[in-house]
Image (cartoon, rainbow, N blue to C red):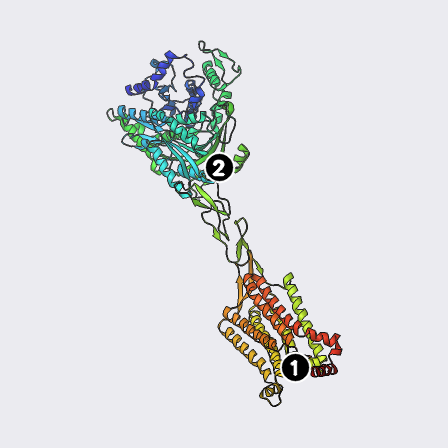
């Protein structure tokens, strides 16, 4: 008993001192009260059962000693929980929970306040020796660490194993030390998934550049380790890490350094983690009061929504908090609203009004109110003062009360109450027995949540995510924007309500927080030496490579049948291109080929019709017929080059071209040799005359054509032409062409044609001045000169073009060289046959011959 009185006295020393230094009715109520509100205060409650009924009005006295909104919340949660248990017929029959007048304390720094006592005088405390009370006291401490440690240490020193301690508020590893706190239970679950939940949210909003301010203790270090582990998986980086000392004097020495870290950093998101009554909280309040525009990501213990400020609403000026998810307790609001307001004094009403309505109160006369609402009711004040939903701490209190009730109930069922005191050691034995029951207890609370007291068997964590904005004039907006459940597979644990974000802010987009601007599609990231992984540069993708997402590390090369668009963010299917009949160029070349072949056919018809005329007979009409027929096929040959290539046309293109042109050029060579022999052989009986009469020159055509056929056969056997796709020559196009197969064979054919043409040119040039009316040596000379000029020009032009233009150049060369032969050799003769028939007569030929004889 002495130990309990000693504890109560220690907790209330600052309170007693304040009675002599402040107005009696308004302890710790100043204009800057709202600045102290965010610092959580420690509250201690004693849970005792009595074998008597307890009415609801019994709990009204609790509120008369609270000074802050959070104190009222804790006390109301305790009163509601105890009242609900007391009215439960299935729990603790013939027993009721009460709050013993030995009191508790609420601390703010080093200041303690009494929360539950029937009288203001210490001497009025009733003695705690009653036969009908429980023999083991349960102490509720929290929500901060300091209060729980102080009370737990004192209890362990003065009354070991005689009082059980249950803490509400955040989980602390320090309190899990069984040697230091053998009879202590923590209602809160471990924050093992908090780091993953926060990083998941950060990744969801595409943030990768964040700041961190944590308490410099084991809990903060453990949280930092978990945070780094999760950040490495998703490439999130720290802009700064501030380890805030626990001791206030050390913090004050470096307070400006910590502030400058946040101010100078480019991050817009800062994680806050630590005790809300530590030096970190002092720094946080300072940063907020100086108007730092940041999004603070933290836990629900930093959830103050009533902080007064004059800053306009800004999406940067708010917090995102994580709170343990629990079911809604709807009956709590009804309980609070039905508490009898007549039990409260004018002093209490004045205090609540002064705190929340900012009216003035006379220091000398506590009951005199100035500028306050005359009809303000306690119910209105309660609703306006704090959120009626259960906080994490309130929910821990709720579960703690039920845990104790279930443990006592189990003991009752086993008739523990009937056991003897064991010679004065009954209290010790009773607490040990209760301790053993409480450690194993597991139950489902009235709202359907599962509760397990064994810390090693705690259920997986679920968090509710809230977004909070502090508005001008002390108003606050708190919206639930999502949930995080560790039950789901990795990557599917976070669920964000985008519509709630849009309702609250007008936009689903959150402010960015990145070290470097995103590399847009079409660019790739490259790391910068000495910088974090989240800080990078952007460079355009190389040619024909794309990136279709932001912040891609590497570009992807398009397939051969695709090409990169101008923005280099998409691969587009290349168009299949070839020298088509439907294209303008293909159509023109087709018309030209058909026209010249038809024209050559007409010329052949003219020659056949006038086959008995001197001009046709004079120059070996059979060779003329062969040449015209070969030219018809030369003009038709380009049709094999136009249209979609296939294996047959690819082979026929080059073979037909080689054989037909060899036939034409060798025919020209035969004509030039024939002319030369005809004018050089003058004496009868000479051997050369025999060659001319016997038709030996005609074998030139056979031999030359046979050589070409042999070359073509070798070409086809070893490296024949084939269909090929040219995907590189033209951007965005796949050009289907006939690959020559063997380039050497192709140039051998051209070289062979060139040698025949050059030989024909030399022979014709030698015979150009021979006297004769129908001597065509000059015509053959010009035709071969034109033929050689076309193909000499073809070579550089052919190699300087690509795709279907290259094919068109070859077709034009075929048409031009064939047209040169036709025009130079046969057009003049057709002119004489059709337009100057008088020159195509035997008399004219004889007249010219006799005149030459007379002259000579």
View extreme (left): residue: 423
Give residue 512's mark.
2
Q: CA distance from mark 1 to mark 2?
A: 92 Å
View extreme (bottom): residue: 685
The residue indicated by pointer 1 is 620
Does residue 834 appear left or right of residue 593 in this picture?
A: right
Sequence-earlier tag: 1 or 2: 2
The answer to whether the residues at label 1 and label 2 have Cβ atoms under 8 Å apart is: no
View extreme (top): residue: 364
Does residue 376 appear left or right of residue 148 in this picture?
A: right
Nearer-the-camera pick, 208 or 233 = 208
Nearer-the-camera pick, 791 or 497 = 791
View extreme (front): residue: 855
Q: Quadrant of residue 218?
A: top left
**Quadrant position of the C terminus in the picture:** bottom right
Give residue 167's mark.
none
Label 2 crowd bin: few (<14), some (14–19), many (20+), radius 10 Å: some
**Quadrant position of the N terminus in the picture:** top left
Residue drawn at x 52%, y 77% as measured from the top left: 710
Mark 1 secondary-structure assignment: loop
Residue drawn at x 42%, y 13% as measured from the top left: 25
Is residue 414 in view from this perspective?
Answer: no
Q: Position of residue 353 (x, y in %)?
A: 48, 17
Q: Position of residue 158 (x, y in %)?
A: 27, 23
Q: Position of residue 594 (x, y in %)?
A: 67, 69
Nearer-the-camera pick, 699 or 313 = 699
Mark 2 secondary-structure assignment: loop
Does residue 154 appear left or right of residue 193 in this picture?
A: left
Q: Position of residue 358 (x, y in %)?
A: 49, 17
Nearer-the-camera pick, 756 or 357 = 756
Residue drawn at x 73%, y 82% as measured from the top left: 847
């Amino acid at each position: 008993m002495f130990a309990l009185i000693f504890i109560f006295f220690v907790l209330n020393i600052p309170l007693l001192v304040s009675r002599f230094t402040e107005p009696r009715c308004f302890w710790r109520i100043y204009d800057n009260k709202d600045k102290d509100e965010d610092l959580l205060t420690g509250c201690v409650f004693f849970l005792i059962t009595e074998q008597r009924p307890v009415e609801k009005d019994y709990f009204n006295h609790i509120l008369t000693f609270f000074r802050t909104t959070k104190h009222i919340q804790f006390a109301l949660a305790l009163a509601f929980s105890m009242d609900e248990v007391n009215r439960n017929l299935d729990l603790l029959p013939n027993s009721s929970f009460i709050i013993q007048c030995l009191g508790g304390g609420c601390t703010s720094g080093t200041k303690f306040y009494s929360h539950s006592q029937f009288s203001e005088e210490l001497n009025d405390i009733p003695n705690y020796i009653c036969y009908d009370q429980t023999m083991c006291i349960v102490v509720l401490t929290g929500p901060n660490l300091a209060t729980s440690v102080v009370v737990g240490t004192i209890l362990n020193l003065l009354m070991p194993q005689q009082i059980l301690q249950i803490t509400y508020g955040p989980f602390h590893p320090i309190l899990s030390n069984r040697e230091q706190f053998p009879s202590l239970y923590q209602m809160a679950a471990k924050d093992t998934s908090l780091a993953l939940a926060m990083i998941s949210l950060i990744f969801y909003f595409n943030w990768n550049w964040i700041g961190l301010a944590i308490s410099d203790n084991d809990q903060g270090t453990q949280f930092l380790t978990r945070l780094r582990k999760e950040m490495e998986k998703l490439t999130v980086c720290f802009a700064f890490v501030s380890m805030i000392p626990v001791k206030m004097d050390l913090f004050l020495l470096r307070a400006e350094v910590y502030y400058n870290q946040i101010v100078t950093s480019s991050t817009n998101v800062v994680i806050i983690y630590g005790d809300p009554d530590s030096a970190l909280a002092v720094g946080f309040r300072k940063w907020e009061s100086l108007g730092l525009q940041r999004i603070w990501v933290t836990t629900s213990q930093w959830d103050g929504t009533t902080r007064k400020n004059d800053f306009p609403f800004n999406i940067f000026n708010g917090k995102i908090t994580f709170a343990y998810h629990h079911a809604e307790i709807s009956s709590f609001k009804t309980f609070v609203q039905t508490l009898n307001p007549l039990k409260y004094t004018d002093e209490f009403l004045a205090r609540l009004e002064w705190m929340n309505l900012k009216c003035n109160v006379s220091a000398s006369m506590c009951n005199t109110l100035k500028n306050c609402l005359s009809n303000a009711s306690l119910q209105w004040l309660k609703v306006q003062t704090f959120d009626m939903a259960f906080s994490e701490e309130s929910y821990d209190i709720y579960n703690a009360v039920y845990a104790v009730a279930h443990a006592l109930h189990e003991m009752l069922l086993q008739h523990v109450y009937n056991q003897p005191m064991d010679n004065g050691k009954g209290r010790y034995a009773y607490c040990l027995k209760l301790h053993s029951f409480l450690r194993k207890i597991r139950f489902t609370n009235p709202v359907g949540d599962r509760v397990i007291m064994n810390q090693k068997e705690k259920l997986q964590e679920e968090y509710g995510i809230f977004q909070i904005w502090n508005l001008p004039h002390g108003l606050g907006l708190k919206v639930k924007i999502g949930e995080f459940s560790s039950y789901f597979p990795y990557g599917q644990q976070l669920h964000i309500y985008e519509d709630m974000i849009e309702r609250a802010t007008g936009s689903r987009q959150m402010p960015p927080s990145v070290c470097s601007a995103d590399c847009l599609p079409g660019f790739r990231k490259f790391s910068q030496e000495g910088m974090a992984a989240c800080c990078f540069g952007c460079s355009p993708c190389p040619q024909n490579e794309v990136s279709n997402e932001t912040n891609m590390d590497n570009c992807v090369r398009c397939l051969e049948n695709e090409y990169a668009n101008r923005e280099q963010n998409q691969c587009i299917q290349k168009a299949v291109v070839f020298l088509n009949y439907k294209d303008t160029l293909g159509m023109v070349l087709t018309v030209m080929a058909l026209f010249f072949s038809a024209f050559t056919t007409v010329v052949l018809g003219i020659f056949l019709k006038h086959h008995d005329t001197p001009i046709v007979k004079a120059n070996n009409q059979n060779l003329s017929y062969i040449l015209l027929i070969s030219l018809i096929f030369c003009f038709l040959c380009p049709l094999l080059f136009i249209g979609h290539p296939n294996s047959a046309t690819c082979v026929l293109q080059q073979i037909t071209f080689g054989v037909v042109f060899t036939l034409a050029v060798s025919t020209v060579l035969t004509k030039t040799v024939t002319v030369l022999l005809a004018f050089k052989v003058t004496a009868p009986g000479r051997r050369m005359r025999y060659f001319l009469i016997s038709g030996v020159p005609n074998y030139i055509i056979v031999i030359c054509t046979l050589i070409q056929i042999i070359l073509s056969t070798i070409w086809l056997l070893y490296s024949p032409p084939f269909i090929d796709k040219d995907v590189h020559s033209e951007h965005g196009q796949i050009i289907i062409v006939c690959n020559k197969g063997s380039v050497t064979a192709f140039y051998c054919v051209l070289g062979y044609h060139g040698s025949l043409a050059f030989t024909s040119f030399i022979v014709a040039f030698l015979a150009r001045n021979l006297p004769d009316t129908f001597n065509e040596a000059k015509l053959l000379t010009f035709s071969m000169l034109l033929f050689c000029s076309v193909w000499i020009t073809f070579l550089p032009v052919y190699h300087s073009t690509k795709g279907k233009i290259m094919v068109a150049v070859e077709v034009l060369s075929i048409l031009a060289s064939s047209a040169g032969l036709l025009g130079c050799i046969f057009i003049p003769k057709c002119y004489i046959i059709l337009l100057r028939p008088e020159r195509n007569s035997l008399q004219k030929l004889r007249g010219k011959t006799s005149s030459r004889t007379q002259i000579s």
